[in-house]
Image (cartoon, rainbow, N blue to C red):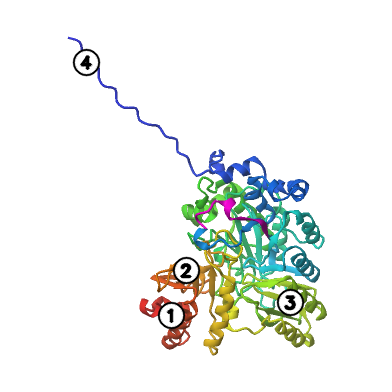
Amino acid sequence: MTATPATPAPKRKVTRHRGEGQWAVGHFTPLNANEQFKKDDDGLNVRARIETIYAHRGFDSIDPSDLRGRMRWWGLYTQRRQGIDGGKTAILEPHELDDEYFMLRVRIDGGRLTVAQLRAIAEVSQTYARGTADLTDRQNIQYHWIRIEDMPAIWQKLEAVGLSTTEACGDTPRTILGSPVAGIAADEIVDGTPALDEIHRRVVGNPEFSNLPRKFKTAISGSPLLDVAHEINDVAFVGVDHPVHGPGFDVWVGGGLSTNPRLGERLGAWVPVEEVADVHIGILSIFRDYGYRRLRNRARLKFLMADWGAEKFRQVLEDEYLLRKLIDGPAPAEPIGRWRDHVGVHRQKDGNFYVGFAPRVGRVDGSLLAKVAELAAEHGSDRLRTTAEQKMIVLDVREDQVDSLVAGLEALDLRVTPSPFRRGTMACTGIEFCKLAIVETKERGRTLIEEMEARLPEFDEPLTININGCPNACARIQVADIGLKGQLVTDENGEQVEGFQVHLGGALGLEAGFGRKVRGLKVTKDGLPDYVERVLRRYLADRQEGERFAQWTARADEEALA
């Protein structure tokens, strides 16, 4: 009898684990289009093509991988074509959204400007950018309406006064936030300027760090106001006074917002100012080598930090990159004030004064900036600062010049003593120019300020209202008292209109945390002033002694917040 042959077992499909695209574990193969174009050519190299080819042949000559990729390494993004409504943002292809003009970001590390630099910024705005020049919440200036043909002349003008657009965008080490009163504030714990300068010297434009998984944001401040939003940066160095070693910095890693917000974590390490650059480069190198590159939406450092935890992150930093142990250190003290934008008149440690002022939602223009530069020069100052709250500061003003400078700024509608609404409202670029946006933001913020000043003139509590045109949180909606995320909503007539999802009670600094989303709470653009007035009046009527708005929203019922 012939045996019946056994039926062979089905072959088990062998699949290779794709990993997360981490270079340090051998995953070098590009796993998405962004990784491919970065592998094909370093983004830093695109400048030569802009200067020698694209500026002469025009927009249509630009290679697509340069246009929507590498040009970001030099601060250039295509801007939104005019007339495209928010309902088409997620539907149209990139080339359908692109205008033949660019946003250009000037990086201003630490927010530091001279009068000559501000004059150059103003001149570029008026000559090449149709007067546009917005203050951002990362201490930069952003232009719009930039033509590729004008870029060589713009770079020449900016670089002649020591300004740069290098790695202002892209998968790179972005602008370094720094305390705008570093080195001059009377209450400063430690001056982070030498560390900021050393990081800039060693990192910016360095091909070793020009291909990161995603953008990398840094903040350094020795101010007791905690004035650089350290909790939401990839890495931050926060001034502390060690009981044994003296003034230095506490290290935070892995913060960020967007659609997956996460607060940074302390490594528990104290670092003296002269070692900050080494630690920064170690953390930056961990991100480059171990950061997730397979999926673009998981490529920020916060995802690696969430998986590793602070203990493992510090161990890898010490064992593989620094080759030494870090000193344990204390956490920062609570911030000394509830505003950290430096608006107002303040005495410097040298006896002079600095004067901080508030435009509306960061919206300025070249003509206005030129006037600010002249005012500063006329009052004996050669130094100005931008802040991480879309504000500006004039430094080094003699006491006998303060009143005159304040009067000059106020005459330009740049408020030195603004209302809480002017002071606390920020807005991103919005649909006016941004290809990701769904709603308008800058004008919405301006009109909201005016409405609230008229409706609640006696309101005097610190309050932040952050307006964002899409879910990406460039204006930090999750950490505002009132955070407004732009989206299309249905009005009372059943029509889709611009509106906002509302986040309430977010904060940075004191009791940092993300805002509360009330189920179904959305407002139309036209209904926004009514809603803000309503919720603020309820807060004023129900608050306990000394209770902040964020604290009240945490305990209020949903009916009170609706």
The earlier-in-sequence mark between 2 and 4 is 4
Task: Check disc 1 and report the residue beneath it.
Answer: 552
| Mark 2 and mark 1 residues within 8 Å of each other at the beta carbon | no
Q: Where does the image place residue 122, in percent across and percent down from the top left?
A: 76, 69
* 429 left or right of 491 in image: right
* 235 left or right of 145 in image: left
Binning the other alpha carbons within 10 Å of mark 2 as few (below 14), some (14 to 19) or many (20 upward) gives: some
Task: Check disc 4 and report the residue beneath it.
Answer: 4
Task: Check disc 2 and report the residue beneath it.
Answer: 497
Q: Where does the image place residue 238, in percent across and percent down from the top left?
A: 60, 67
Task: Check disc 3 and report the residue beneath it.
Answer: 394
Q: CA distance from mark 2 to mark 3?
A: 41 Å
Residue drawn at (71%, 57%) of the image: 200
Looking at the rendering, the stretch of residues picked out in magenta corresponds to 89-103
Which secondary structure lies at badge 1? helix
The front one of 438 and 412 is 438
* Quadrant position of the C terminus in the picture: bottom left
